[in-house]
Image (tube, rainbow, N blue to C red):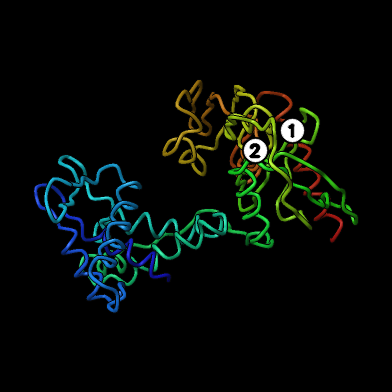
Amino acid sequence: MSKTFERYQLVLQNIPCHPAYVTSLELKQMLLSHELLDSSLDDKSQMKTVQRVITKVASDYYSIEINTDTRPHQIKIAQGHPHPINPSAMSSVLSLKIIEHEVLQMLPPTMRKEVANLISTSNAELDKRTELWKERFTYSPIEFQLTSPQFEESIIEDIEQAIVDKRSLHLSYQKRGDSYTQEYSVEPVGIVLHGRSFYLIAVKENTDQYRTFAIHRIKRLKLGFSLQNAHKSFNAKQYIQRNVPHFSGGEFIEIVLNIDNYEGLHLIEESKLSACQEIIYKDKNITTIKAKVRDSLGFEWWLMKNANLIEVLSPPHIRDKVIDNLHSALAKYQKSE
C-alpha cells in the first residue's frame, strides 16, 4: 500500500463529525506517529504535505468542512452529514464484503487497486464491532461466478487515458471465433462492464459508426493523436439501452408467464420482475402474471434458469426462443445416451 494512500486514509478516518473537529497540527502529529511523514523534513515542508492531503480529502467528500479562519485550521464533518467511513457499522462491513466478492474483480485495473487497498485498510482496523460483524455476516452470491477474462492492464489504462485526453486509438482486434485480427482506428467514448467482461464503446475513424469491442479480444493497442472533433458528451448507459439490447438494454415488452405455485411462486412474490407486475389469474396449481421487462439476454438467461418452473405464454417470439433453446439442450443430452 502506498504512503500517499495510507496518509489519505488516516486523515479521512480521523476527521470527526460536528461539533467536534481536528486541527491540521493534530493530523500532522498523527501522520508522524504512524511514520507517514518524513521526520527529516522541516516543519513547513511537513505541514505542506498535510495540507495537500486535507485538500485532496475535502475535494473528494463535500461533507468535509475546513475552517481556514483559525490557526491551525480546523477540520470536521459538517453538521447533519454522516461520516463517509464508518467501518464498525454493519452496513459498511456488508458493503465491503459484497464489493470484495462480487465487484472487485470486475473493476478496471486502476480502480481495482484503489478499492483493494481500501478493503485491506478496513480489514486491518482493530475494532470490536468491526470484528463482530466480520464474524457474524457473510455474503453468498446466488449466481455461479465465472472468472474474469484476462487482458493486459496497460490496455485499459491506455483506453482510460484516451477517453480523458480525447485521443484516438489504433487497435488489432480478434473477433469471436476468428483466428486472425483486424485493424481499427477509433475514437473511444465509453467503457461498459457486462457480467465480468469489459467492452469498449468507440466510433470508427471518419465515420459515425459506433462499435462495441470486447477488451479481452484486443490483441494490440496504441494511443493516437488528439482528436479535433471529439465527442463533447456521451452517456454509456443510454447508448447500451438503445443500441445493445443483448446487454441490459433492449425495448420494453409485456411478458405473460405461468408460474408453478409450490416451486416457483417465491420468484415473483419476494422479488418482482418489475414494479408494474400484476397477477391476472390464480388457481391452486399456477399463478399467471403480467409485467413489463427489457427484452435482453439477461432476461432470457433468467427464463432458461427457471424453465422447469415457468412457462412463457407471450409474447410469441420469447416463447418460441425458450422452446428452441430447450429442444437444443435436450438434443445434446439425447446424443450421449
104 and 94: which is toward the camera:
104
Residue shown at 39%/68% (left/top)?
120
Is the residue 169 above or below the residue 34 in the image?
above
Q: Amino acid at mark 2?
A: Val
Is the residue 301 above or below the residue 273 in the image?
below
Circle 2 residue:
189
Left or right of 78? Residue 289 is right
63 and 175: which is toward the camera:
63
Q: Are marks 2 and 1 in contact (CB under 8 Å)?
A: yes
Numbered badge on residue 210? 1
**Residue 59: percent from left, percent from top:** 34, 46
**Residue 300: percent from left, percent from top:** 66, 38
Quarter of image, res 251:
top right
Residue shown at 85%/48% (left/top)?
183
**Residue 186: percent from left, percent from top:** 76, 40
Number of residue marks: 2
Left or right of 282? Residue 33 is left
Residue shown at 62%/40% (left/top)?
190
**Residue 117: percent from left, percent from top:** 42, 65
SS class of the residue under badge 2? strand
Residue shown at 78%/36% (left/top)?
204
Quadrant of the frame with the C terminus: bottom right
Quadrant of the frame with the N terminus: bottom left
